[in-house]
Image (cartoon, helix red, strand yellow):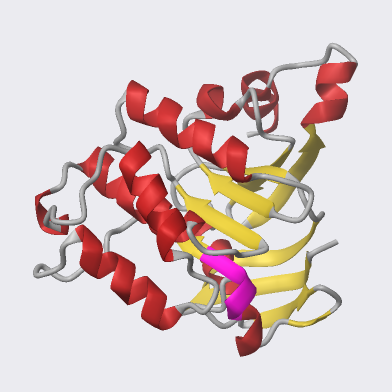
Amino acid sequence: MILECRNLTKSYRGKRAVSNLNVRLEEGKIYGLLGENGSGKTTWMKMMAGLAKPSQGEIFYNGHPLNYMDKNEIAYMATESFYYDYMKVSDVEKYYADFFQDFNPQKFKELIARFGLDGQMKARNLSSGMNAKLRIAATLARDAKLCMLDEPLNGVDYKAREDIISIIVEEADENRTFVISTHLIEEVESFVEKAIFIKNGELIKLVDLEQERAAGGRSLAEIYISVM
């Protein structure tokens, strides 16, 4: 187990975004994080990344309470782009290299090349799909043990989705855990191993999709419709 949340709650102005969430993440698994807009998915991921402080409850990472040092092993890709207007792709590389000790510049160069990006491209001029590729390349160029991608396929064309999914599958191994938030259920059906369903900030269900497939059970889309 790489991470555990116990009675995790986050409130904003008296309204709960995440409510008494209890969940465990196993090492080396790919999790799909599923739920409607406003269900609390992003808030939960930000708490796990250490970017938001819980109102109540606890987060344990590798058996100890989550602390600022754990950020060195946790990578989070937000849905929004945060690059400055002046930045080129090469500046994004320098930015990540300055902030994260586990960032691998050579791996970043290999990933952007696969994505059809060039170091001299202006980040602000990239299409939404190319911008998503840049953020994913920067995130996956880190040697993080826990990688969280918030809507990595959102606003991305079919070919780009295939490229992104291919790289995620390649990067996944027994020492690396992925949490992928998405609305595109059919796109992640083939490679997600466990699915976390969240509604109104609460954990509705955690499904082992490997067991479902082995038993000839329901598809991820069918499960989603039944529980949400």
Provide residue 35's location: percent of width, then percent of height: 56, 42
Residue depicted at x 36% and y 53%: 109
> Is 123 positioned to the left or the right of 184 in the image?
left
Residue pictured at 22% horizontal, 69% vertical: 91
The image position of residue 201, as x and y in percent, is 60, 58
Tell me: 121 left or right of 220.
left
Q: Position of residue 36 (x, y in %)?
A: 50, 42
Q: Nearer the viewer, residue 160 or 1?
A: 160
Provide residue 62's location: percent of width, then percent of height.
81, 73
Q: In the image shown, does 227 or 115 lie closer to the viewer? A: 115
Identified at 56% across, 46% down, the residue is 180
Among the 4 quarters of the image, the one containing residue 6: bottom right
Q: Which residues, given as a range, are shown in magenta? A: 71-75
Residue 158, compared with residue 115, is above or below; it is above
Instruction: Looking at this view, name the residue that lies furthest to the top.
Output: 216
- Please say if 17 is above or below 161: below
Task: Place residue 228 in its image quadrant.
Answer: top right
Answer with the quarter of the image where residue 157 lies.
top left
Q: Nearer the viewer, residue 92 or 50?
A: 92
Residue 14 sits inside the magenta stretch: no
Which corner quadrant holds the N terminus?
A: bottom right
On screen, residue 114 versus residue 178, left or right, reads: left
- Predominant SS of the magenta segment: helix
In the displayed image of the protein, which residue is found farthest to the front? 106
- Give above or below for 139 relative to 163: below
63 vs 87, nearest the viewer: 87
Above or below — where is 57 with respect to 113? below
**Total marks in image:** 0
